[in-house]
Image: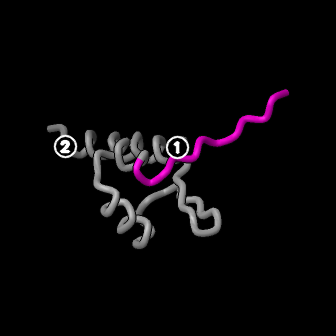
């Protein structure tokens, strides 16, 4: 059975996905506000699956709170 590996995004790739600046993402990482952060030595990557799940959860929470 093939082993599935997580897709790790670079910070610029994650910034595009979130429509944020690269600087904003680094600030979120420093504040431990971004899930799925993986450190590989000096390199920082973001697990795509974890990030997409986090987006789905936050979108559902904001939609439920904003409906009247």
Please name whichever residue, 61 or 25, is drawn nearer the observer in this view of the structure.
Answer: 25
Please report the bounds of the magenta region as a residue range.
Answer: 1-12
Check the picture and name the quadrant holding the N terminus.
Answer: top right
Which secondary structure lies at badge 1?
helix
What residue sits right under mark 1 in the picture? 48
Answer few, some or many: residues within 10 Å of disc 2's Cα (few below 14, many 20 plus, some between 14 and 19).
few
Residue 23 rendering spot, x and y as whole percentages: 32, 63
Check the picture and name the quadrant holding the C terminus.
Answer: top left
In screen coordinates, is 13 left or right of 68?
right
Residue 27 rendering spot, x and y as whole percentages: 35, 68
Q: Earlier in the sequence, mark 2 or mark 1?
A: 1
Q: Residue furthest bottom?
A: 30
Q: Where 23 sits versus 64, above or below?
A: below
Residue 54 rendering spot, x and y as whole percentages: 44, 47
Magenta residues: mostly which secondary structure?
loop
In screen coordinates, is 21 left or right of 1?
left
Q: Is 53 a magenta residue?
A: no
Q: Which mark is nearer the camera, 2 or 1?
A: 1
Which residue corresponds to the image point at 58% horizontal and 69% vertical from the top-left?
42
Q: How many marks?
A: 2
Please name whichever residue, 65 or 19, is drawn nearer the observer in this view of the structure.
Answer: 19
In screen coordinates, is 37 left or right of 41?
left
What residue sits right under mark 2 in the picture? 66
């Amino acid at each position: 059975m093939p082993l599935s590996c997580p897709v790790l995004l670079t910070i610029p790739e994650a910034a595009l996905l979130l429509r944020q600046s690269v600087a904003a993402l680094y600030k979120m990482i420093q504040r431990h506000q971004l899930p799925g952060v993986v450190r590989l030595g000096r390199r920082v990557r973001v697990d795509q699956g974890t990030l997409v799940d986090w987006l789905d959860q936050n979108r559902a929470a904001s939609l439920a709170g904003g409906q009247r």
